[in-house]
Image (spheres, rainbow, N blue to C red):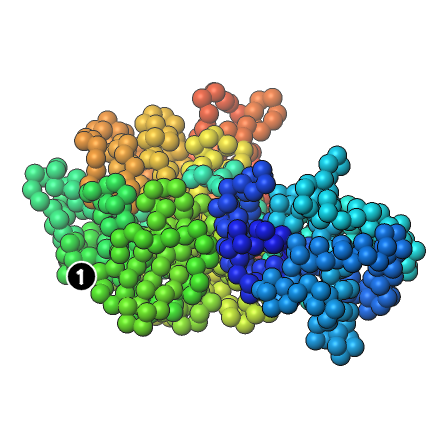
Amino acid sequence: MEFHVHASLRKATGIGKALFTSSGNLIIPDFTAAREMAQTLRGLGSVRGQDTSKLSSGRLNAMGLVDEILHMVVRLYRERVDRQALPRLMRAAQEEVGARELETLLKEFCAQFPPREVYSGGMSVDAWLAGAPPEASEGSGPGNRELAFEEMILLKLANENPAFGPFRFLFDDGLRPLKDIPDSLAAKTLYAKVFAALDKKSPELPGFGPAGEERSLLELLRMPAKAAPDSLEAQLRWIKEHWGARFESIGVKLLSGLDLIAEEERPYFPPGPGPAKAYNYVFSREEYEKFTQDRDWMPSLVLLAKNALVWLHQLSVTYGRPIRRLDDIPDSELDDIASRGINGLWLIGIWQRSPASEKIKRLCGNPEAAASAYSLFDYEIAWELGGWEALDKLRERCLWRGIRLAADMVPNHTGLDSAWIRQRPELFIGSDRCPFPSYSFNGPDLSEDPSIGLWIEDHYYSRSDAAVVFKRLDRGSGAVRYIYHGNDGTGMAWNDTAQIDFLNPEARAMVRERILHVARHFSIIRFDAAMVLARQHIRRLWYPAPGSGGAIPSRSEHSLHEADFERAMPGEFWREVVDECAVKAPDTLLLAEAFWMMEGYFTRTLGMHRVYNSAFMNMLKEEKNSLYRLTIKNTQEFDKEILKRFVNFMSNPDEETAVAQFGVGDKYFGVCTLMVTMPGLPMFGHGQIEGFTEKYGMEYRRSYRDEKPDLALIERHEKEIFPLLRRRRLFAGVEQFFLFDFIKDEGYIDENVFAYSNGLDKDTSLVFYNNCWQRSSGTIVSSCAYTEKDHSGEPHLRRKSLVQALGLDP
């Protein structure tokens, strides 16, 4: 990528001599160089009255690409149409202004936009113009005079191009509609008159292009700017569409240039759910079916989440004594959990956490913070919780009560200073060069290992930027590597994490080994942010196809062609995990936190036992009842089995509490009734049953609000919810689950009313809930359509009457 820079600015910008071609164009070899150049220009603040503080590296790169491609057009025209085109134009200019004036113009052009040898002082302008590049001396290219003339034409076109406007101060020819700039090319020479002559002569030259669409040389060179005068991005797209076949060699550059612009203009998505959409399975129909069968205990599972450190603090306050280890949890607490019909306990934050994460959070203003529960040093039980000994004792006591333990597994990344970062840095995505020149790493060294140094980018501490990499120094070799933070592409990178490289087969194997390690100790594993490790999202986020980048800043320059990506990651990581666990840990339930409309894919194709169903919480909270009913309908019309694999919840650790979202009255209990009587896995949040309002951060060591359990709320759970949980197996399956349309007396469907039946053997249930304050009355007659397979496996849509659904037909 290349473009012109005025000699007076080459010293001001501090651009090195090596970055210029022999003909004087500035070369930007890669995106890092483009960012460095843009930062240099932004640092100038103002040049010739033009504000440079907001210049874009993506557009700087795009401008250079356009200039480079126009040079290719000239070369192609010379090779295929008329080798004497430029000499003919030079003669036309000479006839217009005279030989001396043309010579003066060429010399002034070379003085203001000097070739490398002239700028360095190694050659005079006259000597350079009289010479030729090495290839020309062999008879295969133009001499320097012709090269200078070509560069001058492209300089004129650059000044004409409105989309080049923000960068015009670099190569301003001084030609203005009303007045020339003093000392400019236009002011000191007959530059304007020469180009008037060229515009007159160019149409006389042979045309070039498809039959019937031939264009003169200058017309060809002006086409991108004419097609999209105000957008460099649009000019690149026009070139790709219209000239891409002729310039295949630069195709990847074009796509990558568009990616760089996309990265810079990537929208920020604030925390929280995106627009509510009903699940659909249009693309899933093309995927294979390979569910993992449940073990006998899995369908009746009811899960309770507990932030381990916060829970132990709350128990210490309740019981008036220190409760710090997992095996200190009183029997009475476990008895209460079991008596309510809850038989799964998810302990959040029990692994060894990253010391660097704790330092970062304390440096950023929370002196009591622990490390994040999702920034891990290793998958060993934290010593402050009693280690494996305490866990083993707690597990034994829980199993005696029929409670199985669940733990998180964070496969996407490790903590910033994990054991792997210390010992195996090659397992992570990184680069030997810092991707952005604006990054600086002058803050505290976060490493506790004297053999390495670790720094996050300085602007994290001031909250003025969110870098995508951190710096790792090997103190033994002096090698520096910039390792990417974990990132899902929706907002800021997670600054206390390091992103594992899943194109590295050894990294994939080591993560699978850690998963099996966790499976040997826990009956349930929750995979955090599992969707980011689906192949399509590893591709999208970290190794995009040329032209499809932009999700994570700087990753578009690491784009891969499809064949290369396919070779590096031929199969789905999660399918490999599921298949290996089926052999080596078959009694472990695998639960995926997955969004982005991948719920069906994760269970039906990748084989996860359960998957998060965020639509339940988001749609019912906002009373988007028709959307949630459509989600159920679409799911059962595609494959009913997916329904029983949903994890339904009213809150999770990343969201506001259930009380904050649903209150403590009838709406809460209505939605909670749906949660515990629909197929799938019901999950209660920490403090949900007690009515706690505080959202616990993953770095909390304790609760900060002095909240007492809401006894009335607990009592209503005892009357209305817990009896249903104790009969959970009746509601968990899909074989006898039927959804009904609630028909109003006026004949239309009331989408606010949820009506469905279910059963187990000869026991049946019928549930009605109106998720709206407006009263309703009506009838149900026959079920909504669902897919049922015949003996040959062919799917067919079926319906059942209410009588049939309840098993009342004779």
The N terminus: image quadrant: bottom right
Q: Residue at x 35, y 46 (%)?
A: 460
- Which residue is nearer to you in this view: 264 or 183? 183
When asked about the image quadrant of residue 431, the answer is: bottom left
- For label 1, the residue is 388
* Residue 180: % across, % down: 72, 40
* Residue 314: % across, % down: 17, 39
Residue extending farthest to the bottom is 138
- Which residue is nearer to you in this view: 651 or 493? 493
When asked about the image quadrant of residue 79, the answer is: bottom right
Would you say 531 lies left or right of 659 here? Answer: right
Would you say 327 lies left or right of 505 here? Answer: left
* Residue 769: % across, % down: 44, 30
Name the residue type under label 1.
Trp
- Which residue is nearer to you in this view: 243 or 399? 243
560 is higher (above) or lower (below) than 602: below
Q: Residue at x 58, y 59 (%)?
A: 28
Q: Residue at x 30, y 37 (%)?
A: 695
* Residue 372: % across, % down: 28, 49
Q: Is residue 34 visible?
A: yes
